[in-house]
Image (tube, rainbow, N blue to C red):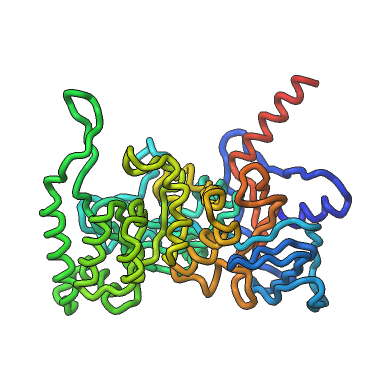
Amino acid sequence: MKFRNFAKQLLIGASLVLSLTFSASFAIVPTPAPDQNGPIALTGAIIHVGDGTVIGDGVITFDDGIITAVGSASDNIDLTNHEIFDVQGRHVYPGFVLPNTSLGLSEVSSVRATQDIVEEGDINASVRSAIAYNTDSEIIPTNRFNGILTAQVAPQGGLISGSSSVFKLDGWNWEDAMLSEDVGLHLHWPGMRQRRRNSESGQYERVENENYQGQTHLLQTLFQDASTYTGEPVNLNLLAMQPLFNGIAKLFIHADEAKEIISAVRFARSYGVEDIVLVGGADAILILDFLLAESIPVIYERIHELPLREWNDVDAPFKTPFLLHDAGVKVGIGGGATSIDRQRNLPFFAGTAAAYGLDRETALAMVTGINAEILGVDERVGTLETGKDATLFISEGDALDMRTSQVIGAFIQGRDIDLNGTQQQLYERFRDKYQNQVE
C-alpha cells in the first residue's frame, strides 16, 4: 500500500484498507517505486533517530531522496512547498538494516534452481553476491512490511564464500538496488568440533573435526599467496582478496566458539588484515577482553536460538547483546543464524534483547545505526539525520514489538514503496472468501 493512499484515508477518517492487485494464476512482486518528485514533510511524528534519541511531536522533511531537516514542531522547520502528511503521533523509524542474509539469492529451499547461495569447493573468494541478487524475489516484500529496508546479501558455503554487498530493498535490478558494492569477504572458520549423528544410537554428538588441520593449512596457503600476489599469473581468487590487505574491504569472520574466534582473528591479523567483523559470536561473552583489545565489532545472531551448550542458561542468548554492549563491545543484531523465512523477525530479535537488559532505543540502534556502521554504510542509512538517505518507515505502534508493530508506510531514498506482497494478497483473497460465506 502506498503511503499517500494511507494519508488520504487519514484525511477522511476511514479505516485502514489494503488496496491489492491479485492475479489468480501467480503472484507478482510490487513494481519498484518511482523517484521522489517533490519535497515531503511528515509532521506530528514520534521520531526514533536510531542513535538513542527520540523526538516527540517531530517533523522530518526530505527531498530528492535525502533528509533535509529533522526536529520538533517547536523548531519551526520551513515546510513551504512540501507535501505534508500529518502522521498523528505514529512512530517514524530509520529502515532496519539486516546483515548477513541470503535474501535475493535463495527462494525455495527444495528447488535447486532457485538457490544461488553456495558454489562448489572451499575457496570462492571471487564469488560476488552483487551480480546474483534477484530483485524479483517474493521474499523481499515480506521483509519490507516489517521495516527492513536495507540488507547485506552474502554468499554461503565453503571456507571463503565470497564477497557481500549491501542493497536497498527496492529496484528493478541489482544495479538499481545497490547501496554499497563488495563491502567485504566472508571467512567461515572451520570448527574444531562438528555435530554428527551417531549411526548406532541415532543421537547427535559433538565430535572432533578430523579435517581441521587440513582446512586451516589450506587457508594459510591461500592467505600467504594472496598477501604476496603481484597480479601475475591471473588468479581470480587471489585478486579478489587484495582489498583485505589494503583496507578497502572488511573480513567477516563467521565463528561461534571461543577458541575458534580467537584462532580466526589471530590468523587474520598475522596477515595484516585490519578491518575484521565477527559474525555469529555465540561465545563472544567468554572473550570480552580479547574482543575489546582487538577492537572487533560483533554481529550477534543467536537471540532466538537455544544456547550453544546444554548447561548454559536457557535465556543466555537473550541477554548476550546487553552483556556485550555493557562491556563496551560494538554489537549489532543479525538474523543469519535463522532460516531466511525468519529473518524478517529482525526487529523482534531486538525487542527480545530489550526485554533482557537493553535500553529500548539502544536495542533499536543495534538493528539500525550500529548495523549500518559495522557494514560501512552509516553515512547513507541507519539514522534519521540531515544529509542521509530518506530510508525510513512509519509504524502504528512499537516496531520492536510484534504485538503492536504495523508498518503503514515506507520510503527508500524518498521513494514511496508498495508494501504489498504475496502474503497480503493471500490474506485478502481468503478473508473475502470466508466473509462472503458467513454473510
Q: Is residue 352 above or below residue 425?
A: below
Q: Is residue 54 visible?
A: yes
Total numbered labels: 0
212 to the left or right of 26? left
Q: Nearer the viewer, residue 23 or 366?
A: 366
Quadrant housing residue 306: top left
Instruction: Decide which of 430, 93 is in the foreground and name it.
Output: 93
Q: Is residue 6 above or below residue 112?
A: below
Q: Quadrant of the C terminus?
A: top right
Q: Is residue 416 left or right of residue 273?
A: right
Residue 110: percent from left, percent from top = 38, 35
Left or right of 143? Residue 11 is right
Residue placed at 30% from the left, 50% from the top? Answer: 118
Q: Quadrant of residue 291?
A: bottom left
Q: x, y (%) of residue 52?
A: 60, 66
Q: Which x, y percent locates residue 344? A: 52, 47
61 w.r.t. 212: above or below: below
Q: Is residue 183 left or right of residue 400?
A: left
Rendering coords of residue 44 (x, y %): 79, 63
Q: Residue at x 39, y 61 (%)?
A: 298
> Visible in this render: residue 1?
no
Task: Residue at 56%, 52% (x, y): give it.
Answer: 354
Q: Between residue 111 and residue 212, name the one nearer to us.
A: 212
Q: Residue at x 18, y 75 (%)?
A: 227
188 in relation to 21, above or below: below
Which quadrant of the structure image shows residue 290? bottom left
